[in-house]
Amino acid sequence: MSEETLTIEHFKLPLENGLNLEGEVRVPAGTAPKPVILISHGFRGHKDWAFWPEVSGRLAGSGFYTVSFNFSRIAARNIDGINPEEAAEAATLSRELLDLEQVLNSLKEGSLPLAGLADTERIAVLGHSRAGGSNILFAAEHPEVKALVVWNGGSAPQPQQDEGAPALTPQERAIREDQQRNKERFNLEDALGRVSAAALLIQGDQDREALLLQHAGFREQAPQHRYLSIRGADHTFGTVDPYEGSTSALNEAVASTIAFLQEKLV
């Protein structure tokens, strides 16, 4: 199904301190309510980064009410005069989870566009990179999430302040302190073991070593979930930004995601 056959509507959810969550809803033709996918971009990305517009369209074209959005840290970069500490806090994992909460609440309240086409009894979350980790935590804490898909996701590298190294930036310091305050909550292996939703974790076998090791740990500690390793795939499935088109690795990730979600939600 092409983008032209989808209905696309924009939204903006206001937050405190002038922040907001900006995004789009994409739905295919038809009046029946559709299962929902909330899509979360990675730490260095945004909702329009590289493959996300195409992927969001392909998921919607497969029969889903898709919601893609920018985390509030994207808005924080563009607000003149924002307090540097507030801008730094917007980049933390805790803030990412609050943003997901806001999107979910808006969905359940019917305040997102085309709300009548969303079946809020069938909700999935999809996250890439750091957002894959936050989506694991989110699914563990929200039983209304019925399916979880993680793309090359896990714990983000923790900023270190080694002796003789340059001082941490305000953002790096905020992220580090947030991780230290929430060590127990942010334990992804434990959280994944508590996820009641059906889960699919997709990992490129050419990604960075820390994520490959964590993926192996996920398999060992939460064998009840489904896992897929994509041969030859790096952290972005071989794609670049600006986007130059899909790859076989990305196509495999998308096809596997659609098949899994149709199995679990449709």
Image (cartoon, rainbow, N blue to C red):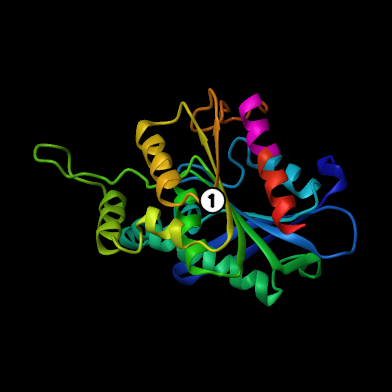
What are the residue bounds of the magenta stretch? Answer: 248-255
Q: Which residue is under mark 1?
A: 225
Q: Would you place residue 164 above or below residue 147 in this image?
A: above
Q: Position of residue 111 (x, y in %)?
A: 69, 73
Looking at the image, which is closer to me, 102 or 169?
Answer: 102
Q: Position of residue 45 (x, y in %)?
A: 51, 42
| Residue 14 shows in this picture | no
Looking at the image, which is closer to me, 192 or 5?
Answer: 192
Q: Would you place residue 210 above or below residue 32 in this image?
A: above
| Residue 171 shows in this picture | yes
Q: Give the farthest residue toward the left.
A: 163
Where's the C terminus, which quadrant?
bottom right
Where's the N terminus, which quadrant?
top right
Picture quadrant where residue 24 is located = bottom right
Residue at coordinates 28% horizontally, 60% vertically from top-left?
A: 183
Q: Give the farthest residue toward the top.
A: 232
Along the horizontal axis of the image, is 140 left or right of 170?
A: right
- Magenta stretch encompasses residue 252: yes
Looking at the image, which is closer to me, 28 or 49?
Answer: 28
Q: Would you place residue 229 above or below residue 159 in this image?
A: above
Residue at coordinates 56% horizontally, 25% vertically from top-left?
A: 238
